Amino acid sequence: MVIKVFLASSSGSTAIKKKQQDVVGFLEALKIDYAPLDIASNEDNRMWMRENVPGEKKPTNGIPLPPQIFNEEMYCGDYDTFFEAKEDNTVYEFLGLTPPPGSKKKDLVEAEQNGDANTEEDSGEKAETDAQEENAEEKEPAEEDEESRKVAEEEEQEEGEEDRVEDNHLVSEAEDDLVSEEEEELRELEEEEEQASEED
């Protein structure tokens, strides 16, 4: 499998030059074999690149700009997708390559090939079971909380009713006091009137 990097050796754009250097420099740093294919001096390379970049990956003008990266005939991506893969440490996946020994991705691939992936699935199932148990434990206190909240609400309601009854008592006592005061005043007035009429 050969990684093909389509470049423009005589590009006038400094942005394109920087992007090309970034891709090539990174591949060299990782010691990944690649074939630089110039689209500026080779019409076949340019045509092949344009025809093999998927339609949804082409810019609005329809002409994909270098660098464009392929693994043999398989399209990997342009500079932006390469940069994202670089940031996410998924360059080998992006290029469709098996990671070298010592990288985490490589260990995972080997584990799957050796059947160790089952243990990973088991641990996944165990984690899921543990999570379900934790959820069940969390639900029980939640139910207890619900019950204690209901009891507290009922107690508050009862206390509220008692307060209302007491308030009613207070109101009725106050009304009684008012009524008795009015009666007293009426009596006094009547007595005064009687006295006045007696004097007359």
Image (cartoon, rainbow, N blue to C red):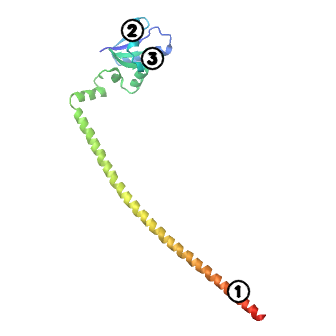
Using the rendered image of the protein, determine whether residue 29 is visible from the camera's viewpoint.
Answer: no
Position above or below: 94 against 149: above
Q: Earlier in the sequence, mark 3 or mark 2?
A: 3
Q: Amino acid at mark 1?
A: Leu
Q: Quadrant of residue 176?
A: bottom right
Observer able to see residue 175 = yes
Q: Earlier in the sequence, mark 2 or mark 1?
A: 2
- In depth, the one of 199 and 11 nearer the eye is 199
Labels 3 & 2 near each other (Cβ < 8 A)? no
Foreground of the two, 17 or 138: 138
Residue farthest to the right?
200
| Image quarter in which the N terminus is found | top left
Q: CA distance from mark 3 to mark 1?
A: 109 Å
Q: Amino acid at mark 3?
A: Lys
- Identify which residue is drawn at 26% across, 40% down: 125
Q: Which residue is mark 2?
A: 45
Marks 3 and 1: which is nearer the front? 1
Report crowding for label 1: few under 14, some 14 to 19, many 20 or more residues within 10 A (C-alpha).
few
The residue where tag 1 is placed is 189
- Report the quarter where the C terminus lies: bottom right
Task: Please identify the quarter of the rendering in which residue 152 is found.
Answer: bottom left
Q: CA distance from mark 3 to mark 2?
A: 19 Å
**Mark in front: 3 vs 2:** 2
Q: Which mark is residue 10?
A: none
Amino acid carrying label 2: it is Asn
Image location (x, y in percent) of residue 159: 46, 69
Residue beneath the point at 35% across and 56% down: 143
In three-dimensional space, the C-alpha distance between marks 2 and 1, rounded to whole angstroms, equals: 122 Å
